[in-house]
Image: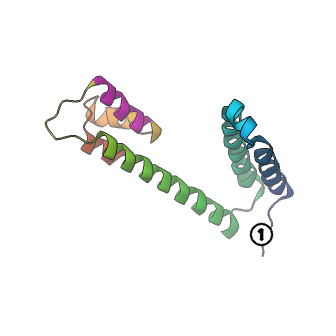
Amino acid sequence: MREQISSEMWEQLNRLFYESKRMATPEFWGAQSHDLLIMVTQSSHLFQGITDSTMIHGEGWQFIQVGRFMERVQATAKLIDLHFEEFSRGPHDAMNAAEHMEWIGLLRSCTAFEAYCKVYTADLRPERVAEFC
């Protein structure tokens, strides 16, 4: 049985495409770039919700899920790589307050801060942070 993408999914994709073209002009981007980013985020969430509620959870739906999770893994790996490159230090170097906040930010962006604190309390060490991200 061949799965069909619902008309609501196509409508959402088309709405996102045309709205992003309209909003991505240099004039709009300079003045209201935040609105474009919010619109893309909301449209992505809406598309995912429509997908989950209207598609049969067969091969087509699983293909969409794999793509979503692969993209998430790539973005997380890039974030971690850039963070460790920027804030790497020697094992005995003291961490200043700004670096401390950066490591907390990394854990929060990976939704791992609470889990880290349950295991290691607030003693932030880069090698331990890597375990949780």
Name the image quarter holding residue 51: bottom right
Name the image quarter holding residue 128: top left
Question: Please, what is the dominant secondary structure of the magenta stretch?
Answer: helix
State whether residue 17 appears in this view.
yes
Determine whether the residue tagged by mark 1 lies in a helix, strand or loop.
loop
Q: Position of residue 104 (x, y in %)?
A: 37, 32
Q: Closest to the observer: 5 or 23?
A: 23
Q: Is residue 104 left or right of residue 75?
A: left
Q: Closest to the observer: 19 or 131?
A: 19
| Residue at the (82%, 53%) spot, across then down | 14
Q: Is residue 92 above or below residue 73?
A: above
Q: Is residue 92 magenta?
A: no
Q: Is residue 96 above or below residue 103?
A: above
Residue under label 1, please give it: 3
Q: Is residue 107 magenta?
A: yes
Name the image quarter holding residue 63: bottom right
Q: Residue furthest top?
A: 97
- The N terminus - image quarter: bottom right
State whether residue 114 appears in this view.
no
Q: Position of residue 23 (x, y in %)?
A: 76, 41
| Residue at the (37%, 37%) spot, across then down | 115
| Residue at the (71%, 31%) spot, across then down | 32
Q: Is residue 62 above or below residue 131?
A: below
Q: Amino acid at mark 1?
A: Glu
Q: Residue furthest front?
A: 26
Residue range of the region highlighted in magenta in the rendering: 97-108
Q: Position of residue 26 (x, y in %)?
A: 72, 40
Q: Residue furthest left?
A: 92
Q: Position of residue 25 (x, y in %)?
A: 75, 42
Few, some or many C-alpha atoms within 10 Å of disc 1 (few <14, some 14-19, many ≥20)? few
The number of callouts visible is: 1
Q: Is residue 2 left or right of residue 30?
A: right
